Amino acid sequence: MHKPQNHSVRPRRSRNDHVKFRTGLIIGTAVGYYFGAKAGRERFEQIERMLDRIKRSAPYRQLEHKVSNIAEEGRAKAFDLVDHLVEQHPTAEAPDNDLQKDPAELFADPRLN
């Protein structure tokens, strides 16, 4: 009679497996860096031109607009949730540092503007 196998048990991984993975990752990164550097400035500029064309395209702009709207909706929902939680727990005290700032300003990356 056939005995069912338990497929939910994962085989144990040895420390050697982790070392092999790290070694492969380091070698892969080094090879990528080497060939990327070898491609040089000309290839970099070619990629930049291609990205500029993509960014000027209508589909990209539509997607950018949609993503921006989704992010703004998420931001508004987060503020509503925080307001709701504060209303539920009015006695909870929070530190005064940065509470007057807009959370978007706290985490904004000026390079993205």
Image: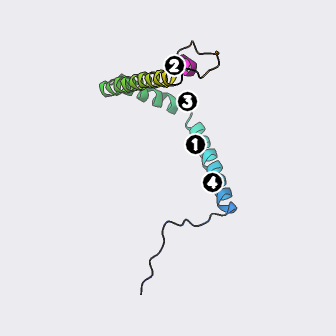
Q: Is residue 61 above or below residue 2?
A: above
Label 3, on which residue? 41
Q: Which residue is mark 4?
A: 24
The residue tagged 1 is 35
Density class for disc 3 (Cα within 10 Å; few <14, some 14-19, many ≥20) is few
Residue corresponding to mark 2 = 104
For the residues carrying marks 4 and 1, which lies nearer the camera in this image? 4
Pointer 3 with pointer 1, Cβ within 8 A: no
Which residue is at the front of the view, 49 or 28?
A: 28
In the image: residue 24, left or right of residue 108: right
First in residue order: circle 2 vs circle 1: 1
The quarter of the image holding the N terminus is bottom left
Q: Is residue 105 magenta?
A: yes
Residue found at x 62% / y 42%: 34
**Which secondary structure, mark 4?**
helix
**Which disc number belongs to residue 72?**
none
Q: Could you tell me residue 104's position as x and y percent?
A: 51, 19
Residue 53 visible somewhere in the drawing: no
Give the residue drawn at x 41%, y 29%: 50
Identity, as a three-letter code, of the amino acid under mark 3: Arg
- Residue 2 in percent (x, y) is at 42, 84
